[in-house]
């Protein structure tokens, strides 16, 4: 077996055009060894080697990543109730020096009284966010414009009540 070193708390995996993107959430503040910043690691599936990573500036505060999704050439990710976007084609990606992730969000979902983003996806120009409301009542799904279709990014398009604990989205269209 081969070991590929990535960041702390690897969680989500996404394959895009022959590369594996690993979302490393970073250690939380209550970790015995202290908090670490989240980052994204790109692994070339043909070679099995890390071909680059995206992380936060060294001077920025410790940031733990929430959810992530790749749509087209854009990487979307969440921190708290904020949604961010990074254009994966903006600059060539390499192991050193790593590219820096933006620290200004596209939009924040707290306007809809969402206290935490539990589920997250991007599909067909829309950003899907779910709120679990403490897992004891029906959750909600909020659909926002991603800005890819010409409309304003972060515009709330639809809200729907769903079952308890909505955590993922699956598309068959």
Image: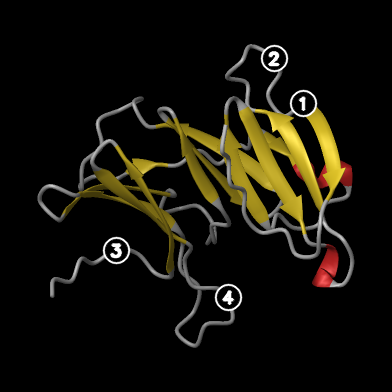
Secondary structure of residue under mark 4: loop
Q: Which residue is mark 1?
A: 155
Residue furthest front in the image:
172
Residue 69's spot in the image, x, y percent? 50, 43
Q: Are marks 3 and 2 in contact (CB under 8 Å)?
A: no
How far across and down, in percent of the image, does residue 119 sit? 65, 54
Residue pictured at 65% horizontal, 35% vertical: 127
Q: Which numbered disc flags the more N-terminal residue, 2 or 4? A: 4
Q: Which residue is more in the foreground, 96 or 151?
A: 151
Contact? badges 1 and 2 (CB < 8 Å): yes
Look at discs 2 and 4 and give the one toward the viewer: 2
Q: Which residue is mark 4?
A: 29
Tell me which colouring the rendered structure shows.
Answer: secondary structure
**Which residue position is annotated with label 3?**
6
Q: Is residue 118 above or below residue 98?
A: below
Say which residue label 2 marks: 151
Q: Position of residue 67 (x, y in %)?
A: 56, 53
**Vertical comparison of 66 with 172: above or below:** below
Q: Give the alpha-carbon distance from disc 3 to disc 2, as whole Å.
A: 36 Å
Residue density around tag 3, few if under 14, some if 14–19, many if 20 or more, within 10 Å: some
């Amino acid at each position: 077996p081969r070991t590929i070193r990535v960041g702390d708390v690897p969680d989500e995996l996404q394959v895009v055009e022959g590369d594996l993107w690993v979302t490393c959430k970073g250690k939380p503040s209550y970790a015995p060894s202290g908090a670490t910043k989240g980052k994204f690691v790109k692994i070339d599936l043909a070679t099995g080697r890390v071909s680059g990573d995206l992380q936060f500036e060294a001077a920025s505060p410790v940031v733990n990543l929430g959810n992530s999704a790749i749509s087209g050439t854009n990487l979307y990710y969440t921190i708290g109730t904020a949604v961010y976007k990074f254009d994966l084609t903006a600059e060539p990606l390499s192991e050193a020096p790593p590219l820096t992730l933006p620290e200004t969000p596209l939009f924040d979902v707290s306007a809809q009284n969402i206290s935490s983003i539990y589920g997250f996806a991007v599909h067909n120009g829309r950003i899907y966010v779910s709120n679990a409301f403490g897992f004891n009542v029906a959750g909600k799904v909020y659909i926002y414009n991603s800005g890819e279709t010409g409309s304003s990014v972060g515009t709330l398009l639809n809200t729907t009540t769903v079952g308890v604990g909505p955590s993922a989205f699956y598309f068959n269209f």
